[in-house]
Image (spheres, grey):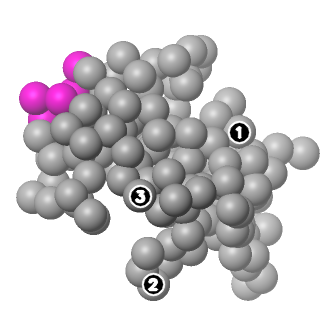
Amino acid sequence: MSRQTISTAGAPKAIGPYSQAVSVPAGRLLFCSGQIPLDPASGEMVGAGDVRAQAERVLENLRAVLAAGGASFGSVVKTTIFLLDLADFGAVNEVYARFFPESPPARATVQAAGLPRGALVEIEAIAVVDS
């Protein structure tokens, strides 16, 4: 199986042993690692204590990774949202809905005991690569 690692300066560098995304020819799928609210230029966390600001940055980072892999939000078929606190579900939904205005992908949302670097939200995605 041939696989291509996707990396872009438009999103923060991986802070562990994972890729921003991996593209595989079988099914033309793009598997995007979870993004947290790091500013790609500074590497610093944004929106301390503000889940809406963090969700916005996470989705902008995810947009960059998708684009680097030849995909877009319109081609995302599945996401997983990890929240530090499920009480933030509604706030994150408000931001998320702006990025997926029509035909949103399948999704799971889970509460995590902790997220990298103290993030309040992390989102991963699977997309079909655009032709």
Q: Magenta-highlighted stretch: main secondary structure?
A: helix
Above or below, comparing residue 127 to residue 16 in the picture = above
**Residue at mark 2:** 17
Q: Is residue 92 left or right of residue 89?
A: right
From the viewer's side, name the closer residue of 36 and 128. 36
Q: Nearer the viewer, residue 89 or 48?
A: 48
As measured in the structure, the alpha-carbon distance from the residue carrying label 3 to the one carrying label 1 is 25 Å
Q: As displayed, is residue 26 above or below residue 78?
A: below
On the image, the x and y values in percent for residue 80 come to 37, 47
Give the residue drawn at x 59%, y 57%.
Answer: 41
Pointer 3 residue:
44
Residue 27 x, y percent position in the rendering? 73, 59
Q: Residue at coordinates 69% horizontally, 75% vertically from top-left?
A: 5
Q: Amino acid at mark 1?
A: Ser
Q: Is residue 13 above or below residue 121?
A: below
In the image, which residues are magenta?
86-90
In magenta stretch: residue 33: no
On-image quarter of the C terminus: top right
Dot 3, crowdedness within 10 Å: few (<14), some or many (≥20)? few
Q: Secondary structure at mark 3?
A: loop
The residue tagged 1 is 72
The type of residue carrying mark 2 is Pro
- For the residue marked with disc 3, what is the amino acid? Glu
